[in-house]
Image: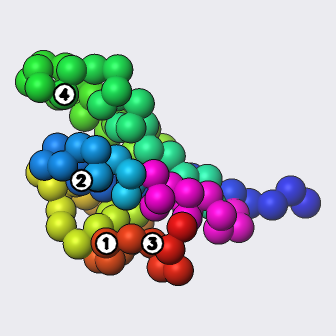
Amino acid sequence: MAPKFKLVYVAHKYSDDPENNLKLALRWVRWAAAKPGIVPVAPWIVYIQSLDNDNPREKELGMQLNFHVLEMCREIWLCGPEMSEGMIREEAVAAAHSVHIVRFKADEPPGGV
């Protein structure tokens, strides 16, 4: 029988310190990818680089696209010690669609990556 994989949405704050937060988010994604059976997704990383995060319409479009992906996931991992407005919205969407919510409050993934 083929192994069961779990699609996990990885959320991390971004806007208040884009360069540093993107580096941290990528560490969390890398850490998740190393876990057996976990398929991490972080579509917001693509959208922040391809849509204008300073344009409210484009930022909202990115959020809505993220929500569609999130609804397909079995879990959301909320990573980092602080929750951004976007993460709070993602958490609410996860709860509304019975996506299991996991909170990691450390700055970086356990064991460093």
* Badge 3 vs badge 4, beta-carbon distance below 8 Å: no
Specify whether residue 9 is in view.
no
For the point 86% across and 56% down, the residue is 2
* Badge 4 vs badge 1, beta-carbon distance below 8 Å: no
Q: CA distance from mark 3 to mark 2?
A: 14 Å
Residue located beneath label 2 in the image: 13
Residue located beneath label 3 in the image: 109
Which amino acid type is shown beneath numbered disc 1? Answer: Asp
Main SS type for the magenta part? helix
Q: Secondary structure at mark 4?
A: loop
Which amino acid type is shown beneath numbered disc 4? Answer: Asn
Quadrant location of the N terminus?
A: bottom right
Q: Nearer the viewer, mark 4 or mark 1?
A: 1
Residue 98, image x, y percentages: 37, 59
**Drawn side of residue 80 relative to residue 9, left or right:** left
Quadrant location of the C terminus?
A: bottom right
Magenta segment range? 26-37
Residue located beneath label 1 in the image: 107
Residue 97, image x, y percentages: 34, 52
Residue located beneath label 4 in the image: 53
> Measured along the vertical axis of the image, is residue 109 above or below residue 51?
below
Q: For mark 4, does the 10 Å Cα neighbourhood hold few (<14), some (14 to 19), or many (20 or more) residues?
A: some
Which of the two labelled residues, at mark 2 and mark 1, occupies the earlier sequence position? 2
Q: Nearer the viewer, mark 2 or mark 1?
A: 1
For the point 33% across and 63% down, the residue is 78
Examine the image and state in which quarter residue 43 appears.
top left
Which amino acid type is shown beneath numbered disc 2? Answer: Lys
18 or 105, nearer to the observer: 18
